[in-house]
Image (tube, rainbow, N blue to C red):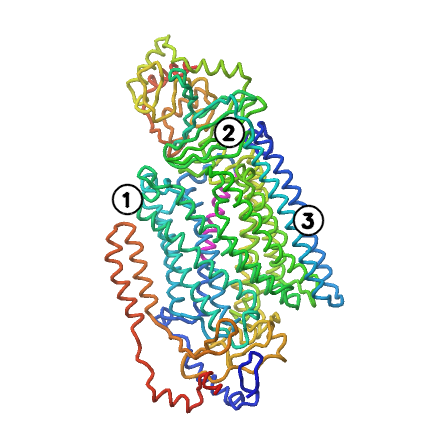
Amino acid sequence: MHIQSVLHPAGIEAALVSRLWWVMFWTCAVVWVAVAGAMLFAIRRGRTRVAPANERSVFRNVLVAAGISLVALVWLLFESVLTGRAQENVSTKDSLHIQVTGYQWWWDVQYENPVPSLQVTAANEIHIPVGRAVVVDLFAGDVIHSLWIPNLQGKIDLIPGRHNTLTLRADAPGIYRGQCAEYCGAQHAHMALVVVAEPAEQFERWLSANRAPAPAPVTPSQVRGKEVVERGPCAMCHNITGSLASARTAPDLTHIASRSTIGAATVPNTRGYLAGWILDPQHIKPGSRMPPTGLSDEELQAVLDYLETLK
Amino acid sequence: VSEGLTGVPLLTDQDERLTSDFLEGEERKLRDTWKYAEGFFGWCAETDHKRIGRRFVITAFVWFAMAGVLAALMRIQLSRPENTFLGPDLYNQIFTTHGTTMMFLFAVPVWLGLAIYIVPLQVGARSICFPRLVAYAYWMFLFGGIFLYTNFFLNTGPDVGWFSYPPLAGAEYGIGKRPDVWAQLITFSEVSSLATATAIVCTVLKLRTPGMSLNRIPLFVWSMLVVSAMIIFAMPAVMVSSTCLILDRLVSTHFFNQAEGGDPLLWQHLFWFFGHPEVYIIFLPALGALSEIISTFTGRPVVGYVSMILSLIATAFIGFGVWVHHMFATGLPQLGQSFFTAASIMIVAPTSVQIFNWIATVWTARRLRLTTPMLYALSFFFIFIIGGLTGVMLAAVPLDRQVHDTFFVVAHFHYVLIGGSVFPLLGTVTFWYPKLTGRLMSEGLGKLAYWLLFVGFNLTFFPMHLLGLAGMPRRVYTYPASMGWGGLNMLASLGAAVMALSLLIYLVNVVVSLRSGALAGNNPWGVATLDGATASPPPAYNFVPSPTVGSREPLWHSEISPPPVVGLSAAKREVLVTRVLDAEPDHRYEMPGPSIWPLVSAIATSVMFVWSIFNPWGVVWGSIPITAALVLWFWPKRGVPPARLAADAAAGHLTPREMVS
């Protein structure tokens, strides 16, 4: 229930904002009660005839009230600016760099590394180490998107032709959910991602596992599945390192079996959903860029067998 | 001849031109001179500000009803997780059309329409300035709405949001003609609003009755003056941007295409430079109307007249300096953003002065009457203020980056726009209904509708704050059940049903009261302004004789009102033009009568706008009929021969300047 909540921070940036929220909430609540209460009182007083008040002193009270609200406003302005500065000052020393590119309607994730063979490509799922700053470089592949992981940090837009960065640090391990927050077309509603914050050594294990190419298929059905992927429609768009499929216009499938969801966190990654997705993504996610594949039953089962090995 | 309050010599009450015999004769002549055009042709040629204003208001409410139905459809879709009532394609068209309609076809035109009707009455004029231009503005508004909904029903309704960000709305990603429909609707609405705003500014500055110096203008008129000025400054920004968008799509100009050196952020700057003032364009007329309602039902002038006006003007100014708070998530530099945070927070200050002035007014009421219009006005203090306070929260960059583009923002701006503009509007319509129709709306049905709306509104929109904080983004056609947003969404949808019921009752009240409402008389509520000095509904010529004013509340202080204006010809559509600052008589001016050319020009303009969506040559060929229509519209009339001027003078129809000598 709280995996996408602003008020359940799991990282320092979100915690700072959550604090700012409560400061503002209570200030505003007091102001609202004061103004609404004053109006109710004024209505009561206005209904009972009282001797006409001195116009000057009435207006003086107005000025005093306006002065008090001005003080409150300036205070909130300071709170806001100070929170922004505290967020800026979170140290990015020894940070992990991830590059996220938004496409209609999925996220391409690259773990940057000066050595190309050590780079890791994933999609729609980000693993991060707990307690270490992460700098996310944001790019847009088509239209404007916005990366928002409420438990960790506010959103920043991914804009074509621009490079934005988002700094975040998870302070508690857990699985969080993020979602595109800038309207980006038909399937804006189904452009989510999963963020897994895990202890450093677990994260390093995940990273090195993801550097490995896909294992060779073992059973005849898996072999057949790989063949369908390579010769069928899949290879037109997808990449599976270790196979002939090397296109880059759709999510990388090299480690698809290790992910918990498919379709940009649209449905759980189970054999049933995966089968439905492969046959007709338009049923689950109408407007999605992936067309129905038209695989036969035998081909489908083989592909599923093969994909399940891509841990 | 005695010294009037404005320093201009005016006639005394004893003048023969004020005897009832003479006035009856005048009235007969005026009725003939100003009579409404008749028949279907006359209906098309009508330029009377009351008829046009009424059409504006009714048409705007028709679009409001359409957009309301769309809102109901969205609430049905979102009432349950993973609902399949609407698909993404239709849902996206619906939310775009809902927002576009509410902003461009309802919230602005409805207040402009009321102003077209009421402002000339409140300033004591016989007509609005440029009546034919106003008629043209109405037709453009009507055709724009028809154009949008025709496309919506043909499944080519815009689906890229009411803000139409490129590249999603650009040539590459905007499917078919849908974004063009949006951009051309904006063009229709720009033309209409600019024309109306010009007419209102001129009316307020030049047609005020003698005695109504700047410091005696009613607060509603002040607010419409400020709003019209804002329209004149804000609309060009969206005019430029929507034109560039159309050009990008039509002839590949690449204004917003980064691959060819354009910039998608340029669009956002231009759009919000218009878009944020737009919010105040919707909100400030309501502030003016609130002042009239609160003043009337407390039986006293609003506290702090000058501070009310300065607040309006300050809000208008600062309103142009806050647009970047719609773009805090675009990654602009932090120092730059903090200036916009400061401006966005500080814009609350002038509004708070107004709010405290109103509270003080109620506090020191002479006679407080809790009528239906007053209830609507008072709910502003409970609903709008929540929206204002969440607005302060959204001005804070760190917080905004969390709740921007979530349901928190949806809640925020519905509290601001419904609490700050629609509640006051429904109160204002109830308030001026008798002036428009001659009958009062039922108080019983009115209060029932009011309380249902109050409850339904809060039930609908309050839960959305919580949904936003729980992570629900805006503009999603569905959401997974596992997110746990279902309960609050269901509550919001039930609230929407209550709102729909309330608005239905309001509509029934409007229709039934047309026949069965109590007769209103000239001034049923006891207003202080000149609109109460004429019949309900007013005659075509508004006033005979035209009143002048000696105070801010002329009808409450009739003892110090100078004698009325005399010397305007009853044989011509003559109005008295006065000076900008002190409203001293300047000269007489003959207003044009009904004309078919505004309609013909509007048809020609609409053809060009629609044609240009499909073919750039539409602009070329389409502008020929427009030019022809405009030339015929402005074909000069023969001047008045000197002999007739002399005859006029002999008959006593003197210009004020001649009167003075």
Mark 2 highlights which residue?
Answer: A167
Q: Is residue B432 above or below residue B101?
A: below
Front residue (pair A45, B63): A45
Mark 3 highlights which residue?
Answer: A33
First-in-chain label (3 vs 2): 3
Mark 1 highlights which residue?
Answer: B252
* SS under mark 2: strand
- Under mark 2, the amino acid is Thr
Instruction: Give the CA distance from mark 2 to mark 1.
Output: 37 Å
Are discs 3 and 2 less than 8 Å apart at CB? no
**Chain for mark 3?**
A
x and y percent of residue A222 in the render?
Answer: 36, 12
- Under mark 3, the amino acid is Val
Q: In which quarter of the image is residue B85?
A: top left
- In the image, which is nearer the foreground, mark 2 or mark 1? 2
Front residue (pair B552, B186): B552
* SS under mark 3: helix
The answer as to whether the residues below labels 3 and 2 share one chain is yes
